[in-house]
Image (tube, rainbow, N blue to C red):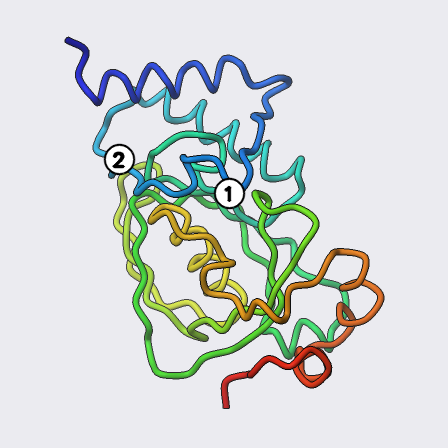
Amino acid sequence: MTSPAARLRDLTLRVVEAAAEGVAPIVRAGHPALRATAQAYDGQLADDELAALVAVMHRTMRHAPGVGLAAPQIGLPLAIAVVEDPGVSDERVAEVRERVRVEARVLVNPAYEAADDERAAFYEGCLSVPGYQAVVARHRRVRLTGQDETGAALDEVLTGWPARIVQHETDHLRGTLYLDRAELRSLAAADELGLRWASEPRPEAASAALGFPLPS
């Protein structure tokens, strides 16, 4: 009988090999992979196989485009995510949202915990829930632990938008979508968001108009 580790490896290799031009299809809300707890990565793949998977994930994220992608989003129940954020050109938005450039990196078996009690609420979206965004109140500062793709330990404190990205992607590995944490009255289609709320650094006008609370 094939072991779970062998089955996971076979599935991973099929996804990597089938990736058209190095880009894998992103599964959408309703796919069981998005609701399963990902398996911890403990060497199920050879080094070159892991590198190939990470490369596909990076290309898929950039092609979408997005600022993060977790393995379950390409149908793999493996606790690996990639992140990269070029930032935004609007200095006011960048300052209020604490959005800074995040270089491309790999998170293996990531976990986070709140670094303090402060929370921040902003619109965010998800590549697996295309066409919509909603306001999510998340920890403003988190302690990130885990490993990188070489096995080196991660233990750092992130603030602002980088902390938000890490929380979003790590949640994917626990079977949690951002909508599970969102203020659903804030849910906005992409065109409405662009028309009404996207230029607002904080979602205060949206909160008043749509009737959802913001953290004090």
Q: For this rendering, which residue is in front, 98 or 206? A: 206
Q: Residue 41 carries which label?
A: 2
Residue at position x 59%, y 47% in the image:
129
User: Which residue is drawn at the image coordinates 70% and 49% (left, top)?
Assistant: 131
Q: x%, y% of residue 152?
A: 27, 44
Q: Which amino acid does label 1 sit on?
A: Leu
**Horizontal side of residue 104 vs 193, given as left or right:** left
Q: In this view, does 122 lie above or below 25?
A: below
Contact between marks 2 and 1 (CB within 8 A): the answer is no
Question: Where residue 34 sits: x, y (%)?
Answer: 43, 41
What residue do we see at 31% from left, 39% from top? Answer: 38
Residue 181 appears at what percent x and percent y? Answer: 46, 65
Q: Residue furthest right?
A: 195
Structural crowding at the residue carrying mark 2, measured as other residues with C-alpha within 10 Å and reported as few (<14), some (14–19) or many (≥20): some
From the top left corner, tell me how far across and down residue 36 is, in percent: 34, 40
Query: Residue 128 or 12: which is nearer the viewer?
Result: 128
Which residue is disc 1 drawn over?
Answer: 69
- Residue at the spot x=67%, y=54% of the render? 132
Q: In screen coordinates, is 134 left or right of 56?
A: right
Residue 29 lies left or right of residue 51; in this view the side is right
**Three-letter code, disc 2:** Tyr
Q: Which of marks 2 and 1 is nearer the N terminus?
A: 2
Badge 2 marks a residue whose secondary structure is loop
